Amino acid sequence: MSQCRSGAVGSPWGLTFDRCERRMGGVSEQAVALTVFGIEVPDAGPVFLAALTVHIPAGVVAVVAGTVAALAPKRRGRHPRAGVVFAVAVAVIVVTAAVMAAVRWRENWHLLAVATLTAVLVAVGWRARRRRGRRWRLWHGVAMSGAFIALLTGFYIDNGPQLPVWDRLPPLAFWFLPTAVGAPVTWWALVRNRALPRRRAHPRRPPGAREARPAQTPEAGRDVGQVS
């Protein structure tokens, strides 16, 4: 049985600490429950909390940098700089996710898998841009967009049940809804940046119109008559 005192400690950044008292077999224990912007964080010890303290800012930085890179013109300057920040933030996310999964493997192994997939996609996109091989823009765009989608998917899988509106969706929506939204946006961005060819509309012939035949020259007519 556990009881928590409401409003014990708070902060302007949305962090709230509640002191809880657990009673197990007549023994009383003091614990601290952490709430970040209304999302409850499990009490899993100081190592888990330390990794989470780094994990959350890295996730925010990755989302902001990924958004800036996606909206910036695809040339030197803002786009590659934001991409570097995004890649570094993803690396931090993977390391901290590994630490948290080691502490709570049963609950967090799937988040480590999503974080690892995100890092692999970032590496593929980075390599494509560095090598600039055949259709490198397509590989780079698909991989980086996939990494951004995977990043959001991991966030919603872990926190969706505690978010407004999202808490009304079935659990499978947390896995597939970011992809369902991100895939069409990715396709549009690839076409817009000429990584994918645009479909050219062929002019339609009016009904009953026949294909024009090339006119024969007088010399060609005389040649046909001689042959016949």
Image (cartoon, rainbow, N blue to C red):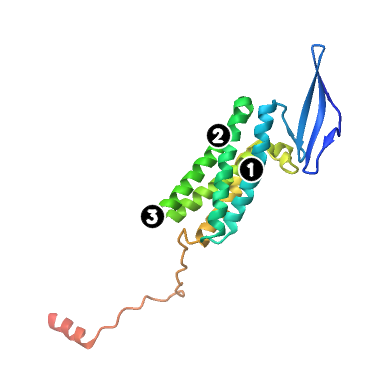
Which residue was labeled with disc 2? Answer: 113
Chain-order first, disc 1 or disc 3:
1
- In the depicted view, which residue is nearer to us: 214 or 106? 106
Amino acid type at image mark 1: Gly
Q: x, y (%) of residue 68?
A: 61, 55
Residue 108, x across and y down, in percent = 62, 30
Q: Is residue 44 rendered to the left or right of residue 87?
A: right
Q: Secondary structure at mark 3?
A: loop
Residue 9 seen from this side: yes
Quadrant assignment, res 222: bottom left
Q: Label 2 vs label 3: CA separation?
A: 30 Å
Answer few, some or many: residues within 10 Å of disc 2's Cα (few below 14, many 20 plus, some between 14 and 19): some
Q: Estimate the spatial distance between the alpha carbons at disc 1 and disc 3, rounded to whole Å.
A: 32 Å
Amino acid carrying label 3: it is Arg
State the image coordinates of residue 162 (x, y, percent, origin top left). Answer: 74, 37
Q: What is the C-alpha distance between the residues marked 1 and 2?
A: 16 Å
Drawn side of residue 214 relative to residue 12, left or right: left
Residue bearing the label numbered 1: 59
First in sequence: mark 1 or mark 2? 1
Identify the image quadrant of the C terminus. bottom left
Measured along the vertical axis of the image, is residue 135 above or below residue 90?
Answer: below
